[in-house]
Structures are given as structure tokens and as C-alpha cells.
Amino acid sequence: MSSLPTRKLYGIAGALSMLAIPYFILLGDEQDQIEHAQSLCPFKMATGFPCPGCGITKSLIFLYKGDLVKSLSYHVFGPLTVLACAVAILVLMVEIATKKEYFNKILFNKRLAYALAAVLAAYHFTRLVLFISTNSLEDILRESIWR
Amino acid sequence: MQRIPLFKNEPILVLILGILTCGLYLIYWNIKAAEVMNAVAERQVISQPIAIFAGCCLPINLYFYYLAGKEGLPKIYEKTGQASKDQSVLLLILGFLFPMVAAMIVQGDINKLYEQSADA
């Protein structure tokens, strides 16, 4: 079983990679082709439909570019993800340094968790309805790897 | 001793519902699976925000399956009298490539908890 500091280190690594991967994609996108690039989400590649997290990477890329409107258009939770990851990194580092745990009441609050999940679910459902109503079957297939 | 919440599903149903709802069901599934694993371990192995954000952020999804394989499932194996094994690598790979299949494996192991209590 991994120790608590090790788990916290993995948490920091996860949050850091969440922030760093879009940055490196942005650095490699010299021809500004990111908007037309094939999504790397396995679900979208297989079905053409977005999963709840689809668009977060592109949202972060446009946020790094300073285009907040486009960032929000790709995923409403994109900017929130940056904030959550930054806070998580900070809190976990402080927890490792002080050997104490903070915000456990918030982190393990079931009501808050369900409320957050409901907001995410409602957003994803709305996005799916819009996606289906504004795209033809051909367009949806083009989002997958099959066309 | 913490009461284990009832969360018994056919693993194939997890796959079907996951696909039909475009991953929406997996947000709910993550929360319920985390609740069961926390109750079995009698401590917070996977926090609720991690369970929720696992449904929409790939690195957090991988962290969810790492925790499930490393600390959640071994407690379930212990409780159901199975040989303890570390499933974290398998779940990490499946969580990266086919999250719904990883969820099916975890659901299958969670189901054994209730089969055992039905036998007793």
C-alpha cells in the first residue's frame, strides 16, 4: 500500500500534468491547427460523440493563449480546472511540508460532491443535445477516427 | 464498522450505460464506486472531488484507477477472502485506453462483496 505522502505526490503529478500537457501542445502547434486537430479522447475517437471531459485540453490551450471566450466555448469547466489544479498543487505541497491535512471537510463533503456532479452532468447533457442538434451524422462520424 | 452501500450492477450494464450516456453514467458510477471502496477500507481512499473530476479529466481519471487498484480493490479482496493482488497497472492502462472496461472490472469485484453476503 502506498504511503500518504506518496499518494499526495501522485496527486501533485496528476494536477501538474493536467496543466502542463496543454501547454506543451500549444508550444508544438506552430501552424495554429489545434482547432481542427483530431481529439485524442478514446471515446470520441471511437464514437464521434464527446465525453464529459472532451474539450478541456483545447479549453486550457485557448486559456493559455488568453482567449477566454474560446476557452469557455470548448469547455465551461476549463478555467475552473486550471484553478482547481493550481489549488490542489498548493494544498498538497503545504500538506506534505506541514504533515497536516487541510480542507478535508470540503473534500469529503458528499452533498457538495453530488451538487458538483449534477452541474457537470447537466452541462454535459446540454452539450450533447446541442451537439446532436447542430451536427449531421456525417459530421459526427468525421469527429471519430472512422472518417 | 461502516455500512457498505449497496451498489450492485451487471458489469456489461456499466459498459452499455457508459456508452449510451456518452460517459455521463460514469460520473455517477465513479462516485458510487468510491463510496463503496471507502466504506470497505473504513477510511477515505478516494475523495468525492477526485471521483467526480475523474469523469472529465484524464490525469485525474488515471489517479482514480490507480487508487482503486492499489488501495480500494485489495481491501475488497481481503473482505471477500480472495488472494490480494495489485491491479493498479492494469487499471491505469485500461483507464487510459478504455475507461469503461476498467469500470467493468472494478464493478465485477465490487459485486463479489454482495455475493459473499448473500451466501453467508
Image (spheres, coloured by chain):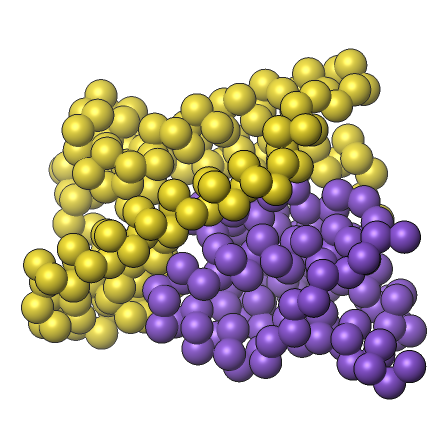
Chain colours: A yellow, B purple
Q: How many marks?
A: 0
What residue appears at the point 63 percent right and 36 percent down from the top-left corner?
Answer: A109
What residue appears at the point 57 percent right and 48 percent down from the top-left corner?
Answer: B51
Most foreground residue, A66 or A38: A66
Instruction: Please identify the quadrant where the C terminus of chain B is shown.
Output: bottom right
Residue B59 in sight? no
Residue B34 in sight? yes
User: Where is residue A99 shown, x and y percent of the image?
Assistant: 81, 19
User: Where is residue A115 shown, x and y percent of the image?
Assistant: 47, 41
What residue appears at the point 15 percent right and 49 percent down from the top-left corner?
Answer: A36
- On the rendered structure, is A3 left or right of A26? right
Task: Locate residue B5: give its quadrant.
Answer: bottom right
Residue B16 position (above or below residue A72): below
Residue B38 position (above or below residue B100): above
Q: Which residue sits furthest bottom?
A: B119
What residue appears at the point 71 percent right and 75 percent down from the top-left corner?
Answer: B111
Residue A142 position (above or below residue B1): below
User: Where is residue A40 shown, x and y percent of the image?
Assistant: 33, 55
